[in-house]
Image (tube, rainbow, N blue to C red):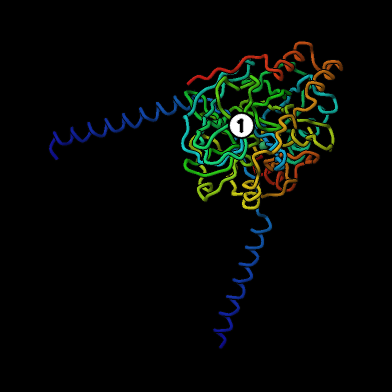
Amino acid sequence: MKKTLRLFRIINMLLIILIIVLSISIFSASAYTTTGVKLNTDYVFSFVPYQGFTELTIDHFRNSANSWNSAAGLTLMSVSGERHNATGYPNNDNKHYVYKETRSDIRAVGQTTCYSSAWPNGNVLKSADVLINSYYQFANSQKENKFDTWSVFVHEAGHIAGLNHTNYTQDASIVMFPQAHMNFLRRYPQWDDINGINAIY
Amino acid sequence: MTAKKKLGLSAGITVLLVSVISVLVIQIVQLSGLQIISLRGCGYDYPMDELVAESHLIARGKFVGDSGAFIVEPTNGADSSVFTDYYFQITDVLRGDADVGDTVSVRLQGGRKDNLYVKNYYDFAPAQGSEAIVFLCKVTIPVGYITNEDYYLPTGTTTRSFYFLDSSANKPTYKCDTYGIEPIVWEDEKESILALSDDMPMNMSVLREGKLEELESDFKNGKLTAAQYSKSVSEISGNSKYAKRID
Ligand SMILES: [Zn+2]
């Protein structure tokens, strides 16, 4: 009788442990994925914006960089005081330019090109460029028929920091959600983005 | 073991070691010269009406093969990149200038050619043999990577532009180095797409509307230099040069 009772208690305990483990794994289910290529934390990655962006847009770029920095607890990236007047995205010139071009050949609202080598140092980013594709219409706020530049840029900066897309079925408010929406704000890293960046750095 | 046998064995081991080492050295040399270019971005999550309005060709058919990777050298000073054409054989035309039985090319960025390795993380390569309804557009303005050939681009990213009709969609191929999220079989929208009539209104200027006016005001406000303004205008009006395809 005692033996059966003890066995019952053990089974009971095992069941409780199982339930706890299962609930932890369900609630902490991560959606983020990483690119496998991270920033060299010995340097601050500095974006140089195109001179055609307004100061307000550039402030929004700066806010994006800062929000990733605070999510990571590290100064990963910044926006330079310099401006460039180049066209011809992307260019592997180690300059970290943010371009604004009308590119009907690129079927994306925003795009990031990251340069790395296969070997050695394959997991460290060599350089990157960002395109804000003015084939689509942008605004510096939530507006009908326009994409919010801040929301697009914070997503691209997330790629440079080493985050890949979440799945299409995930919450669209996560910065690393794969698609962009008009008349919609997605400006700050969310729980999943924050978990992702902290898994990298 | 005789001396002869011993000699033979050690010679064999030496040959094996030398070949393994040389294969490794060749691989390392190749890898160290390999330029990896990773593309990531966010596509527009087109609502169906806009997807329809922006598409020159909406057709049902099957992906039957691909061109293999080739390099495109743009004329705007940007880096060369790698592309692959996917061949799509049409079984039904919902809209556009194509006939049943035609095979059209759908161009996606990504692939490995020589020392250039372009990984596209937002489009997936369609599996050969998969049946789909595709939303395609033809960009004729010679901008960026557009070459002077007869081919289409997906209207949005492939997730939005390729609607698969069979389970083969669940087996995407990454052989051309497109790594996007898995294709989705859009059960909800399939019926409504198939019910689309071929006299749907086409409005290719949905998103380009006001573009020239915007450039003009940017120029007047000093956001664009005269050179940038005329370059952008020529890109939109079609006076710039096509990119060059190198097979
Ligand atoms: Zn993205």
| Whole-percent x, y for residue B111 in the image | 51, 30
Q: Nearer the viewer, residue B185 or B56?
A: B56
User: Which image quarter is the C terminus of chain A in?
Assistant: top right
- Name the residue that disc number 1 marks: B39
Q: Toward which corner of the image does residue B36 lie, by quadrant? A: top right
Q: Toward which corner of the image does residue A41 lie, by quadrant? A: top right
Q: Nearer the viewer, residue A73 or A23?
A: A23
Q: Residues within 10 Å of mark 1 (few under 14, many from 20)?
A: many
**Residue positioned 65% across, 65% down in the render:** A20
**Residue positioned 61% across, 26% down in the render:** A126
**Residue positioned 69% across, 39% down in the render:** B200
**What amino acid does circle 1 point to?**
Leu
| Whole-percent x, y for residue B6 in the image | 18, 36
Q: Inspect this view and state whether residue B117 appears.
A: yes
Rendering quadrant holding ligand 1:
top right
**Residue positioned 54% across, 34% down in the render:** B99
Q: Secondary structure at mark 1?
A: strand
| Whole-percent x, y for residue A176 in the image | 69, 41
